[in-house]
Structures are given as C-alpha cells and as structure tokens.
Amino acid sequence: MKRIFYLLILGLWACEDKPETKIDTWFPYDESAIIEENAEHESEYMRYKLIQSKVSDRNDLWKQIEPQISDFTAEDYERLKPLILEQDMMSMQNAISEDKLSYKELTQWYLYRIVLFENDSLSTLNNIISINPTAVEEAIARDEKKSDENHPIYGMPILLKDNINFEGIPTTAGAAALQNNQTADAHIVSRLENSGAIILGKSSLSEWANFLCDGCPNGYNAIGGQTLNPYGRGEFDTGGSSSGSGSSISANYAAGAIGTETSGSILSPSSSNSIVGLKPTVGLLSRGGIVPISSTLDTPGPMTKSVMDNAIMLSALTGEDSEDKVTIGNSPDKKYWKSLEESNLEGMRLGVMKGFLEDSLYKVNIKHLEELGAEIVEVEAPEVDLSGFLTLLNLDMKADLPHYFKNYAGPSVELRSVQDVIQFNLEDSATRIPYGQARFEGIINDTTSAVEFDSLKTRLMSEGRRYFETMMTENDLDAVLSINNWSAGYAAVAHHPALTVPMGYEKNGQPKGMTFIAEPYSEEKLLKIAFAFEKETKAREIPADYQ
C-alpha cells in the first residue's frame, strides 16, 4: 500500500545552526473504512470494532518523546539509517565503537522513527503504548561509560510488553483498570538494566495477555487500541498476545523486545511479523512483576530480528529470582551468543511432522536443513489428551492475578480479584470491554475443585511430555520442527522451549515461521540450530511500507 506523507515532524529554526524538532498534534482519524472492509474477513480475529483507543490520547506519547528528540533532525535520521535499520546488535555496537554512532543517537533514531510512522494515520500500527521519558538521558550516560567489556545489550533500546513492570511508566496489561499502575521493576527488567540495556518504552498487547474476551481480535486492548501488522495493515493478523512486541520489532522501532507466553503468545506474533521469537523453558526466566495468566505455564522471552540478538537478550534476562521459586537452580548465567558462530547442523537429527509436509514453505525449508547436513526424520505426532487446558488457565489466573495485585501492583491499584476487574469493566463496558469479557467470566464460573485441579495439571504435563518424547526418544531427535505456533499448546504444558525463525512468505505476502522445539533447558541447542538455519535462508524481509 502506498503511504502518503504528511508533514508530521516540523523543523523550526531555533538557532542558526540546527533546527528544533517539534511533533505535530495527533488528531483521531476516520477508521470506518478499515472496519467496514474487515467486517466479513475470513478470520474472526480480523473483524474489528474499533482501531483507535477511546481511553488514551496519543499526544501524551508525543509529550514523552518530543523533548528527547528536539535536537535530532530528519537529516540525522537519514544519515544514521544505514547503521541502524535492519542491523543486529553486534553491528550497531561496532558502529558505536568506531564512533560512527552513539547510544544517544541510536535511542533518538528509534524515537524519531516511531513518530514518523505512528503519527500518520496511513502507516500507524498502534503498537506502542508508552515511552520512557528518560530513555535518551540514560543513553547519554551509557555513552560516558562505554567499554569493550560491556555486555552486547549495553545501550540497546528495548521495548517491554505492557504486562511487565517497569518503574517510571505504568504497567497496564492494556486494561483501563490498570491505567495508573505505577510499579517497581520486574525481576527481568532489573536484569536487563544491570547489563546496560535501555528500556525505550512499552509495546501493546492483546488485553490481559489475550485472556479477556473470546474470539476477539489479536492485538486489541483498551489502552492502546488495535495493533496492526506491518506486512498488511488490516489484512494480516498480528498474532497474540505479544502483538505489539512483534509488530514493533518487525517495523524497526527498537533493537529488541520482550514478550510473554502462556501458550503461543510469543510464537504467534513472532511468526506473524517475520521475526525471531523464543518461548523459553518455564523456570529459565523469572515471572516476578509480570501480570500473569498461569504460574504453571507463563514465561517471558526475547523477540528480535535475528537469532544472534535473541541469544544476546536471553543471556541478559537469565538470573534466579528468590520470589519466583521455579528459577532457583534453573537460571544460569550463560553467554548464549558466544557459541553461535561455530554452530552447524552436521549430525543433528530433526523430526519433521508428516502432517505439516503439505505446507509448501515448510517442505522447501526442510530441504534447506537437509542440505546443511541435518538428518531429517519424518515422524507421526501421537494422539494426546489436552482436554481441560482452559480449566488450567482459569484456576491459575483466579489465584495468580490476586497474587500480582497484592505483591507487585502499584499503590493506586485497589483491585484484589478477577471479580473486581469484571465489575470495574461493567461500569463502562462500551469503552472498557467492547468485545466483552467472556474469558474473565469463565474464570469466575469455573467450579473445579483443588483436588481435580492438581490432577489436571499432572495429566496435562504428562500428556505434553508424551507428545514430544514419543517422537524424540523413539527417533533419537535433537528437535522437532513445527510451523508458527501450531504446536504451542503441547510445548506449553510440557514446558519445552520453542524458537520460531522466519522461513518465508505466502503468495499473498503473509509471513510464516519455522519453529524448533526441543527438550527442557535446551535453549542453547535450539539457538545453534536456528542460527545455522537463518544464516542459510536469510528469509526475513523488511515490510515494504516501513523501509
């Protein structure tokens, strides 16, 4: 789609030497055409009721950005573009070490780019909810202390899915009920900052991590509105629930982003937006300070444009959290990126699911893997029983959300239960829950007993493990190959890590990902396999309208 430029960023001469950048006021636009066009879309997840938020004003976002880019011009943006656009973290670090780029300029470039596209009604993706008002100030501090000994994530601007606590801007989970939820940092945020990363802001998401309404569009929330896919605004699904993280990284709005997954919420938006997404083993990364669905299944994970960047981010996120017991003994300090350059597929045994071979992109990419030296083994997925999966989520969230409210929410949040959220939403349902709240109501109506729940959790994990172990043990496999988030539910209940990498595009331009799944705590192996695959295929292409 041809994007028409309006004059959105005005250069006003404040002095003889350099213009002062100002941001035009945002005015809501007529969204009726895209809503009408999508009313009969073949996917119910694309039938929008609204695009723009009725709760927040985008000009509040610009107020956080404008002072930070006042000395950054269109000329600066174009000059630095070759050093940043589609570049990985190592390349940008090299440019900085050679004094071709600074951390301040890098941060400003991303902020400028966000305004450039998000302040235009014909290109906005609605994928950013909030901006860190001190991001550039922090970048200047990074410039003063740069060193060859720093972690590769040092000075890199990172977006957080807006269900991850960050001190300084609210953590909303996209919900009007949490609009003013000012918190301390989540454990993983502290880990990122300890390595020198800069939190650029918060990316949008499916509200309450896609556990509010039933059959509603992926990527919608009351605070941010409807997130769109840069490969086809209103044409292709963003995937969910980490939709804003997927859309923003694909559009080059930050160096990397953090998503969260219960079942498919990193894999789905990553594959839908042609980026690399890792759903780690539950227990590798802390969930402390993250608005939950399920303490049994939840995990954060990195979302990036490349496998190398994913490995860099994962290394910065690891670390035991005394408040999240599953990490104790399971979250080692590892430099995952170090071993990637030596990776190859010689002797790797990869399981190809026979049922997926009808997919032409999958089939072509299996051949690439074989040419790289992998041993390809066709496998049949066993029948397993995942009935009761929704009950697991219901019962976990009924307990885990109150735990978040009590231990991690800000002092202004008076909510204490799922029922409190339901009641709050009913006070202004048209604005707060235009698609309803059927999943929240399902939580309240679920009468499963504690004994039944314990039995259910044990059975689901056993069935998930059996699904993969039947294929992997019998065939001595290093990993199983899937597509997008098609096997996400099995990986979720089994606590198996899954890594998706761009593998190409359908004839209509829709992205698709190859997803590698292996045994728990085998992230390093997955990253090596994926790195070799990515190096050979180089499948990712920047969205045409976001170059």
Image: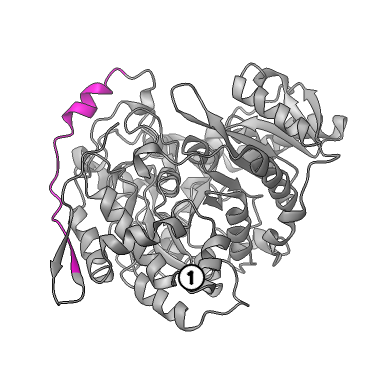
Q: Is residue 473 left or right of residue 430?
A: right
- Can residue 466 be seen here? no
The question of residue 423 being in magenta is answered with no
The question of residue 39 being in magenta is answered with yes
Q: Is 105 in front, or is 394?
A: 105
Q: Position of residue 173 (x, y in %)?
A: 37, 51
* Region rendered in magenta: 20-40
| Figure check: 146 above or below 269 | below
Q: Position of residue 386 (x, y in %)?
A: 63, 29
Q: Position of residue 446 (x, y in %)?
A: 47, 35
Please identify the quarter of the rendering in which residue 219 is found: top left
At x 36% / y 35%, what residue is drawn?
213
Q: Is 110 in front, or is 396?
A: 110
Q: Is residue 465 left or right of residue 418?
A: right
Q: Is residue 389 left or right of residue 38?
A: right
Element at label 1: loop
Q: Is 24 in front, or is 218?
A: 24
Q: Quadrant of the N terminus?
A: top left
At x 48% / y 70%, what residue is drawn?
155
Please identify the quarter of the rendering in which residue 495 is found: top right
Q: Position of residue 248 (x, y in %)?
A: 40, 48
- Can residue 328 be seen here? yes
